[in-house]
Image (cartoon, rainbow, N blue to C red):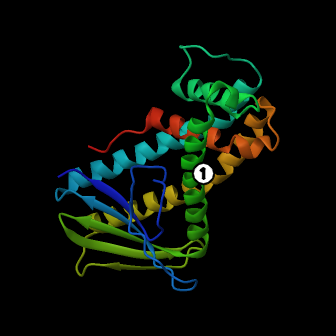
Amino acid sequence: MNAVFTVIEPLPAAIAPPGPWRAQVVGSSFSLGDQPDVIWQAHLPADPAAAQAALRAAAAQLEAQEAALATVTQRLQRVASGAISFSSALPPAEQALLSMLPAIQPEGASFGLGDTLQEWWQAAQEQIAALSAQAREVLGGYATVETVQSGRLIGRTRINWHGDARSLLIAGIDPAHAALHQQTLALALRSRAGLLRLIGLVGRGAAIAATMVAAPAGAIMVLPAVWQFVQEVLAEVRQPMV
């Protein structure tokens, strides 16, 4: 079997965090103080060597995405400074950003982009709102990290943002299997931190991109464009788990 990494979210909408994770929304309603955990699950192959290889590949995927995200600010600064202009030779992220910015200008609607921009704006705003809700969830709630191998739960850790944690492992677990859960936990915590970094990255990027538009409240107007830019940057290195 192939490894599957899933984040099960109680929120009604969710963004997949950096790394190999797929977001699965269950959309439960809850009151403050009765918030269910976000569940991070790694389903690994039965063969120990294959399980280790899957976790190494997942960590490498996360590292590649972290490295790509580290270039976002510099790439936006290059666009804002005029160091690059629209060209088919540009990476898709820069091409998409430069094609979106005219629609944000006050005169953009005159080109018939009003309806398209509104739909695009709404979708991006919903994604940004989901990301913000997930960030609040990370800071205020617990996460449960589970390692499942060949359909059997071998380890579970419940942990909050401050590091308070409790781990349970199957009886008689050997060091190799315990190490698998430890690696899953480390991967989940690193991806959870990456989710929080996305918020700051989009905010800084919006401040840079705002210098390229003449619209009032420029930083707010360009937020969806910057969010799309970040998604395009991640797409450059994001690969399906095999």
Residue found 62% across the figure and 43% down from its top: 224
Quick one: 118 or 197, which is closer to the camera? 118
Residue found 72% across the figure and 42% down from its top: 221
User: Would you say residue 140 is visible in this rendering?
Assistant: yes
Q: Which quadrant holds residue 39?
A: bottom left
Compared to residue 113, the image places residue 123 above or below, namely below
Quick one: 167 or 150, which is closer to the camera? 150
Q: From the viewer's perspective, is 211 left or right of 75?
A: right
Q: From the viewer's perspective, is 155 left or right of 19?
A: left
Compared to residue 85, the image places residue 140 above or below, namely below
Residue found 28% across the figure and 53% down from its top: 52
Task: Indicate the position of residue 53 as horizontal and vertical percent values.
Answer: 28, 48
Q: From the viewer's perspective, is 25 left or right of 88?
A: left
Number of on-image labels: 1
Quick one: 60 or 209, which is closer to the camera? 209
Task: Give the crowd class for mark 1: few <14, some 14-19, many >=20 residues within 10 Å.
Answer: some
Amino acid type of disc 1?
Gln
User: Would you say residue 70 is visible in this rendering?
Assistant: no
Task: Please tell me whether mark 1 sits on a helix, a strand or a loop.
Answer: helix
Task: Indicate the position of residue 61 as horizontal and vertical percent values.
Answer: 42, 43
Q: Which quadrant holds residue 70?
A: top right
Task: Indicate the position of residue 157 as horizontal and vertical percent values.
Answer: 41, 75
Question: Which part of the image, by quadrant, shows the C terminus?
Answer: top left
Residue named by callout 1: 125
Task: Indicate the position of residue 238 as horizontal and vertical percent values.
Answer: 42, 39
Residue found 59% across the figure and 58% down from its top: 129
Q: From the viewer's perspective, is 122 left or right of 11?
A: right
